[in-house]
Image (cartoon, rainbow, N blue to C red):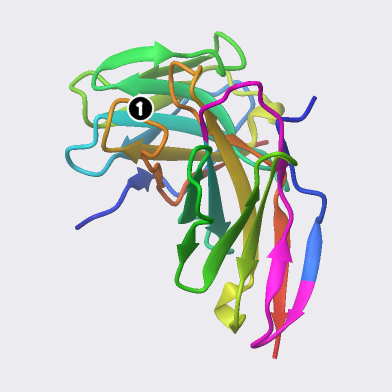
Amino acid sequence: GAGVSQSPRYKVAKRGQDVALRCDPISGHVSLFWYQQALGQGPEFLTYFQNEAQLDKSGLPSDRFFAERPEGSVSTLKIQRTQQEDSAVYLCASSLEVAGLTDTQYFGPGTRLTVL
Amino acid sequence: AQKITQTQPGMFVQEKEAVTLDCTYDTSDQSYGLFWYKQPSSGEMIFLIYQGSYDEQNATEGRYSLNFQKARKSANLVISASQLGDSAMYFCAMRENRAISNKLTFGGGTRVLVKP
């Protein structure tokens, strides 16, 4: 079956522009996560959805970051008025279950955002 | 304090030999899960292996095995019979039971280069 897909794979934005990053999770997966990975570092948690409900947004770095998953499937991460420090790879992951330590997160290929 | 520490930024390993990647973690939870992911240059995070805190046996998955020492809070990944395709970044991650989102907390990663 298809894995997690993300689009676009690469995005170049001028400082101050708004961007929207899309994630298509594995069909039937309840949980969806967004992570930010700066160059040379491990991914850092941004936000979590259980179906359409955003249950944890504690990792969003500022109010310029907004995520949604209106129908409990596709998710969009929006960054308003992009800054150079937003340059990173944005990874989306999905998992089948709601909770449980054993539930494996499957990741997409990421979107590499470069803000000039 | 870092929750996940990977002390080896980079390692060389000869093809067909085994390599051990170190991971130590910090948590006050009794119930937690530990994961290892591989990230090749393409960027996608590939799940390798999982170890639960209550698992009595060390996890194994093909050429991957986990040396879990709970008292020392370490979960080292062992890759046996290294192949050229094993060259990648490797990340250790933890999921704590307290987290509402079951988010993963990642270490900084270890870059492995397999030499022919």
Q: Secondary structure at mark 1?
A: strand
Q: Position of residue B32 (x, y in %)?
A: 52, 31
A89 or B81, which is in the foreground? B81
B15 or B61, which is in the foreground? B61
Q: Position of residue A99 (x, y in %)?
A: 34, 26
Which residue is at a point 60% across and 77% down the rendered structure image? B80
The C terminus of chain B lies in quadrant: bottom right
Which residue is at a point 27% across and 32% down the rendered structure image? A97
Question: Which residue matches tag 1?
Answer: A76
A85 or B110, which is in the foreground? B110
- Up-down: is A80 above or below A25? above
**B57 horizontally vs A108: left or right:** right
- Up-down: is B65 above or below B27? below
Q: Is residue A58 in view from this perspective?
A: yes
Outermost residue on the front side: it is: B56
Which residue is at a point 53% across and 67% down the rendered structure image? B64
Whether residue B17 is in magenta: the answer is yes
Whether residue A96 is in magenta: the answer is no
Q: Chain of mark 1?
A: A
How many tags in the picture?
1
Q: Position of residue A45 (x, y in %)?
A: 55, 28
Outermost residue on the bottom side: it is: B116
**B42 horizontally vs B75: left or right:** left
Region rendered in magenta: B12-32
